[in-house]
Amino acid sequence: MREFLRATVADESAAIERYRSIRDWTVRLAAPLSPEDCQVQPMPDASPTKWHLAHTTWFFETFLLSPHLPGYRPYHPAFSFLFNSYYNAVGPRVARADRGLITRPGLDEVLAYRAAVDLEVIRRLEALGEDRSSEIDTVLELGLNHEQQHQELIVTDIKATLARNPIRPAYRDDLEVLESPAPPMTWHAFPAGLDQIGQNGIGFAFDNESPRHAVHVEAFELASRPVTVGEYRGFMEDGGYQRAEHWLSDGWACIHSNGWDAPLYWEKINGQWRAFTMGGMRPLVDSEPVVHLSYYEADAFARWAGARLPTEAEWEIAAREEPIVGNFLENEAFHPRPAVPGTGLAQCFGDVWEWTQSPYTAYPGMRAAAGALGEYNAKFMCNQIVLRGGSCATPASHIRPSYRNFFPPEARWQFSGIRLARS
Amino acid sequence: MREFLRATVADESAAIERYRSIRDWTVRLAAPLSPEDCQVQPMPDASPTKWHLAHTTWFFETFLLSPHLPGYRPYHPAFSFLFNSYYNAVGPRVARADRGLITRPGLDEVLAYRAAVDLEVIRRLEALGEDRSSEIDTVLELGLNHEQQHQELIVTDIKATLARNPIRPAYRDDLEVLESPAPPMTWHAFPAGLDQIGQNGIGFAFDNESPRHAVHVEAFELASRPVTVGEYRGFMEDGGYQRAEHWLSDGWACIHSNGWDAPLYWEKINGQWRAFTMGGMRPLVDSEPVVHLSYYEADAFARWAGARLPTEAEWEIAAREEPIVGNFLENEAFHPRPAVPGTGLAQCFGDVWEWTQSPYTAYPGMRAAAGALGEYNAKFMCNQIVLRGGSCATPASHIRPSYRNFFPPEARWQFSGIRLARS
Amino acid sequence: MREFLRATVADESAAIERYRSIRDWTVRLAAPLSPEDCQVQPMPDASPTKWHLAHTTWFFETFLLSPHLPGYRPYHPAFSFLFNSYYNAVGPRVARADRGLITRPGLDEVLAYRAAVDLEVIRRLEALGEDRSSEIDTVLELGLNHEQQHQELIVTDIKATLARNPIRPAYRDDLEVLESPAPPMTWHAFPAGLDQIGQNGIGFAFDNESPRHAVHVEAFELASRPVTVGEYRGFMEDGGYQRAEHWLSDGWACIHSNGWDAPLYWEKINGQWRAFTMGGMRPLVDSEPVVHLSYYEADAFARWAGARLPTEAEWEIAAREEPIVGNFLENEAFHPRPAVPGTGLAQCFGDVWEWTQSPYTAYPGMRAAAGALGEYNAKFMCNQIVLRGGSCATPASHIRPSYRNFFPPEARWQFSGIRLARS
Amino acid sequence: MREFLRATVADESAAIERYRSIRDWTVRLAAPLSPEDCQVQPMPDASPTKWHLAHTTWFFETFLLSPHLPGYRPYHPAFSFLFNSYYNAVGPRVARADRGLITRPGLDEVLAYRAAVDLEVIRRLEALGEDRSSEIDTVLELGLNHEQQHQELIVTDIKATLARNPIRPAYRDDLEVLESPAPPMTWHAFPAGLDQIGQNGIGFAFDNESPRHAVHVEAFELASRPVTVGEYRGFMEDGGYQRAEHWLSDGWACIHSNGWDAPLYWEKINGQWRAFTMGGMRPLVDSEPVVHLSYYEADAFARWAGARLPTEAEWEIAAREEPIVGNFLENEAFHPRPAVPGTGLAQCFGDVWEWTQSPYTAYPGMRAAAGALGEYNAKFMCNQIVLRGGSCATPASHIRPSYRNFFPPEARWQFSGIRLARS
């Protein structure tokens, strides 16, 4: 990885600039929020904004400053305990469901903590100049990618929080809605053969993308764009949520025990479906990609449509031919937008994460990193499904064809949608 | 009730002064807290401080301003929904366990809401002068008593919140601890006979204290003061939590399913018991009344001690002879203090609520008030136990011998303790 | 108690006859059932028939044979563990909810165990002749009353089991249904005054009926008969289950979380209510007393009817004037029947247990028996409500005016109904 | 499939003989059990023996007799409802967790139902002679394989039932224990390459084994035999259950919430581990394969041992070289036995199911059967892990190299063990 890091953070001023820019984006995302908004944990899976702000800072303090800066004294003795997440190797931590109970430190103190750690990190990088060790580069790169993951979670988690407010307040009142029509869905064919997937050695990748390895795929076809709101309404109007034959056994149990009959954030008000968005409650836009679906719903839609979800190998083989452009976090739309006509696979990157049919497993010969950082990904390889391609809440520089996101099949609060495949 | 109200709020300036004083105390209780502290709901039974601040204001707006002030326009259309509590008759409401999710309005807006409603109430009272109707007097008096109940809950609920903070922050850092010895416990005897209990017609009383009615009591004795921390440790050291014979069947199940082996807020740190108080973590003070006990623990202690808990009739007959003085909210100790030597029943009022053995039921011939206000007490007459006497979190003017507090037998977050009785 | 016992079990042959007769009734109740029927536990509160057969035998073995018959060797070393119920003092026991998992011993072996213990008990009583100690008399009497309680539970618990069979099999196919009209409900008045309730010293009574003690009651009226099915349907048709104002707060939560909109065992089939009875599924009979109600439903009906439930003192003062006749277990109707015209309070005894409004508490000065038998009643004095008068599943010789039955307010599988009162 | 079926059930007398033989084995498995044993459902995942006996019969009645025998009248109108399992397409069914509540029909009636259906099936096959349609052959073959699956479940489920009996009765008292030493574990190497897995077209296979398809595997090694009890004790003694670094995040949560610190059925009695087996409680035998492990435990052991679990492709490529011999159901050992020395991979088949690391997914291009039978496998492809090789409870003729068993990662009541792999 070192070669790449040396390339991307080649001179210290570029590295510092990148650090500052990514860290600032996190604070920018919290700017429209009150201390109370930043405090609340709407469900065990989602964390308070304040916690995200603090935890990403704790990451740099714990893995960069403490081990690599001789004589560094932690900012506050309790923070290591308060803002550790799942790193068992780093010691005990607050139960995940209890993060919303940490009223102290307050938002102001957490922002001061961020500023203090940033100052130390930058001072340290400046002092080292070209002499940065590869360990520091590695941690720095990992920390910034980690920060970007939490930027996406800030968006999805605060959406979950605001949705629990009975008055459904908007995150921002100035978000624009596009209602252009979507192009028709067509099929793109790919041949059978032995191929390779996984990180390509160019640029940073997480350990779960390695090693690059051979896979054999049968011939397949992929849809030219994600499924739209209008198409998903067709499924609903055809009794999709009422007909067991479309559903996995677990999925059928899940929609019944949760009482689901529509995507997350949809509400039927006076007979009309409306959806909660980062801009508040809105009428549905039929040409937008449908979003906030569980794997079960994505899978059921695909069966109803006479298709299936792609495997992650199929997805990656197809997507690596597409440019990494799209509706990302930096757009500040915070919602997927209608596809625009074109010749390739539209919206492979950005807009909505695309559920694959692949459970999240280790690539052959995968080695987790040593120590606490090795807990980052491998610990979660059970009962999770891979999603690909990033969303409207993903930073543009964070995504790549080999990127593997993963969530349990019942998760809906991410910006998750559907691209169809068939054999 | 009107006669009394006319007496207590005799001229409008006294009424206004009393309104202002009680309302200001609520805000004073919130002053040491951050917006984040005021936001959190630590468990379904306890409410956020911000919710208490808003709900008590909603009470005056809903029951005083809206019906009695022609042309009054509610401060905000959503607040009636957001800050209703259990009044089914007033319409739908936020689920009790979800009060901590209401991030908007923020604390500042809630304080503004308080100020605006106070202004209207006072303006209204000033305008009416001597012409206040008895309905307004009744609602005013009920609203102020309701406010005082929520003052106590602000204290107990924020204690529960701060205790969930891993760093156990103090509510205030300037709280003094008294460590004077407690006088020995002696027994006071009362004869058998036909007597009367219930509200005595002097001053305000809730509907659950009426009607005054005849009861026959057998001869009994009451302890001269509440059970102390030191005495309760004797029970614990004698295996109190390990011996089934002391416990009600439900109580034995309760301590096992919850893993209880000490009062709420006690923590064993390096082999020493310490307790979380409003002043932070502290060593135990053996001469203080023991506090934060469930009914099950109070009952088990009494059996172990060869005694029992008093009935509410016994308690009231004994306590009405005592002066209403003690360690109340206005002391700002926020914790019970050691009894001082004397001849009567020490600490009948204030310090700790005393669990009786009486389930909470209607007095013979009780009539609940009409409409929404009738839901105030009678709806809860099931699976609750009566406590008497007030605590260190009770406003002094709120308590009286006939006052009936009630909680489920497993509740521990109130300042609840033990006074022994025997036949 | 000894005097009475000497009277009722005056010579040993009468005592033996009574023992044999009561014990045989238990076996008779199990006769229509298969080994599989006797095995199943339909819910944690209800026990398998096989367990009742064994536990009642265990009682005589543990409390009569083992301590009072020198050299007695227990029938099987494991049975003391398997068939203990809640007697903590006797040692560990099978978790209550796991009683249905005890497949061994089988029904045949349990019946053999009964026969063997009966043989020993009778042989012992014969050998003692007139020399029975009062301890043996006490245990014998308690054991037979305990046996009768379990006879009632065999009926209610097997009804719960059969109801869980999708094909709703009848306990017996030969049960007759009476459809005579019920007399109109009228009110009987009773004056205020100081009175006494509790066991009257004539005959056996449980410890919870003692001591007899003074109570003061206000003037009250009682309904001439229990509420009928037809009257209860009036409540339902008037939206009784949909209107919060009739319900205790806990009751409203209870019917919603359980989805209750009718008494237990009622099913709406093709738009018609039918009820599962010991004779199988049947149309409703409007003139029968309504049965299988929780306290919450009884209380809500009473409020809707502009009345209330009686206190247990009121009930006892009224009922002691009535003869102890009625539709009891020995009738083998296993269901309440329409009241017949008369001048007194119809159906005070038998047919349906009548919910009072009195929580189950200790009478003043009550002393629980020493040792394991002291756990019989006093351990349960929390969150339970008193019912009075016995039911169609109660043995006739088991009931008396001072008899206190008790169940949690949500219990519905007993034959529980309503008699109204008003002040 | 038809070709094979014609081969295996070539003339009708062989087909009839095979039908009779497999059906009789099921009854033979139930022979040592009482009606009560056959009634109980020890947990929602396991079914009563009586239910297995009836459900397998229902399968032939529903899919063979009803559609293919003109004029066939179902044996009992309620059985279709009572003994359907998860076939949504066949109509409503008893909730899975409620199977133990079906006391009627009794065991005798269910055995009579089996006999009656068997008679009809055999009469039908005899009448058809060589004229059997391929649909009938398909259903017959599927029904017999289905029956064999339930034979294994009868063993595992009755073991779970007997284990819940506090006296831990043996299923049979005549089961022999072998205590021969196990050979040392060695590694067998397999090269990288493109290969094929899935059903090979010879003989019956389930739809989830198709289509045979290409896979690329990297070079790997497999252990010569399963992990033994002694080796697993080494893991436990090294703090295996106490060290988070060995465990998947879900696994760590699972062992803590369930309080697991040893394989299922192990009990520490007076400081010594013992295990419940079909022969009752027994001391551990260190040379036996360890059994009754969850995937989480198998995975944690593998990490601790510096190895990993095999993928299902690796397992199949290696195992297809081994003869299908071993300790199967017909051995009537009902427990794994020590491996015997040899040159190949010992115990690939029989003894213990071997957890792979492969989530259970559809093979590329898999097509589920049409109608109700299509629900057989594909509905469950979520949150399950593949196991391979069969166990001591699997009929010998039921297993093959391509056979895919699957259970959730927390399941332990199957005879599931570990074979290690490494890259």
Image: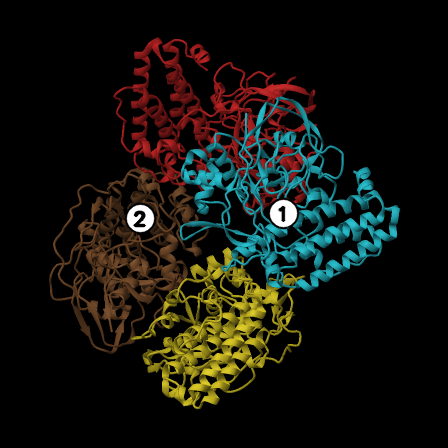
Chain colours: A brown, B red, C cyan, D yellow
**D272 and C279: which is toward the camera:** C279
Percent position (x, y) of residue C229? 50, 42
**Viewed as shown, does residue C111 lie left or right of A387?**
right
User: Residue C393's mark?
Assistant: 1
Percent position (x, y) of residue B281? 51, 36
Q: Chain of mark 1?
A: C
Q: Is residue D233 visible?
A: no
**A328 and A164: which is toward the camera:** A164
Percent position (x, y) of residue C347? 61, 38
Q: Chain of mark 2?
A: A
**A159 and D92: which is toward the camera:** D92
Residue type pointed to by label 2: Asp
Q: Residue at x 23, y 78 (%)?
A: A192
Check the image and report above or below for A385 versus B339.
Answer: below
Mark 1 or 2: the one toward you: 1
Q: Is residue D67 visible?
A: yes
Which residue is the site of mark 2? A157
Check the image and report above or below for A170 versus D167.
Answer: above
**Viewed as shown, does residue D217 lie left or right of D397?**
left
